[in-house]
Image: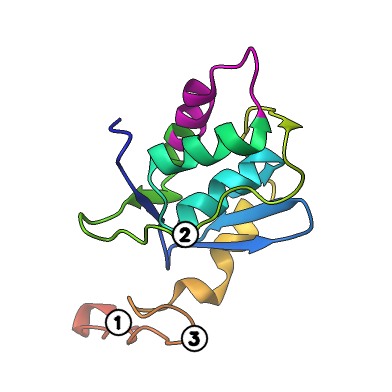
């Protein structure tokens, strides 16, 4: 992966909510939901702000004590997980928001713990039943046009 690569949240298929020390992410197409904590929150915020992999790694190196840790490998592994789960996608070239993200929040010099994407499927069936899925490309709350039934679908 090129360190200059930028990603974006795969909206409207993916929604997320920030809580005190975690990000909860939902893939509306699969019904899976995810959690990122600690450094994962900072990684997600960097991606959401349009920072490149290089910018994220540089900000982490300034904000975290990364002694004895392969920072790049840790970040890239989680980014690959996010891509595999289709939570993020490559941002179009020129879709840079350089300078919009100022790096991880909190105390400087925190000990770096590699981010880990936790996956949950226990509510998958329920999330897939949600009417929010019946929307067009504009997303919720714009409902999709109903599918027109043909003569073969007529119950008479």
Q: Which residues are magenta?
A: 65-79
Towards the viewer: 91 or 120: 91
In this figure, which residue is indicated by the disc labeled 3?
141
In this figure, which residue is indicated by the disc labeled 1?
147
Foreground mark, 3 or 1, reads: 3
Majority secondary structure of magenta residues: helix
Quarter residue 60 falls in: top right
Is 38 on the left or on the right of 145, as rendered? right
Where's residue 155, x and y in %? 35, 83
Towards the viewer: 56 or 136: 56
Foreground mark, 1 or 2, reads: 2
Element at label 2: loop
Is 152 on the left or on the right of 118, as rendered? left
Crowding at mark 1 (Cα within 10 Å: few <14, some 14-19, many 20+): few
CB under 8 Å between callouts 3 and 1? no
Q: Is residue 100 above or below residue 30?
A: below
Where's residue 62, x and y in %? 59, 36
Q: Residue at point 52% right, 75% down?
A: 132
Is 149 on the left or on the right of 29, as rendered? left
Task: Give me the disc on residue 49.
Answer: 2
Between the residue at mark 3 and the residue at mark 1, the CA separation in whole angstroms equals: 18 Å
Q: Is residue 92 magenta?
A: no
Between the residue at mark 1 and the residue at mark 2, the CA separation in whole angstroms equals: 37 Å
Q: Is residue 11 above or below residue 64?
A: below
Q: Earlier in the sequence, mark 1 or mark 2?
A: 2
Residue 87 seen in this snapshot? yes
Q: Is residue 66 magenta?
A: yes
Q: Earlier in the sequence, mark 2 or mark 3?
A: 2
Crowding at mark 2 (Cα within 10 Å: few <14, some 14-19, many 20+): many
Where's residue 148, x and y in %? 26, 86
């Amino acid at each position: 992966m090129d360190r200059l690569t930028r990603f974006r949240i795969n909206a409207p298929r993916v929604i997320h909510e920030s809580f005190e020390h975690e990000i909860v992410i939902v893939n509306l197409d699969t019904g899976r939901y995810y959690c990122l904590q600690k450094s994962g929150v900072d990684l997600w915020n960097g991606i959401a702000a349009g920072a490149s992999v290089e910018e994220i790694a540089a900000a982490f190196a300034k904000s975290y004590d990364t002694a004895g840790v392969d920072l790049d490998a840790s970040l890239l592994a989680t980014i690959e997980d996010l891509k595999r789960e289709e939570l993020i996608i490559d941002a179009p070239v020129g879709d840079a928001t350089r300078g919009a993200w100022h790096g991880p929040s909190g105390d400087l010099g925190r000990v770096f713990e590699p981010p880990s994407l936790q996956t949950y499927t226990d509510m998958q069936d329920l999330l897939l039943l949600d009417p929010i899925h019946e929307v067009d490309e504009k997303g919720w709350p714009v409902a999709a046009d109903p599918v027109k039934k043909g003569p073969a679908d007529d119950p008479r």
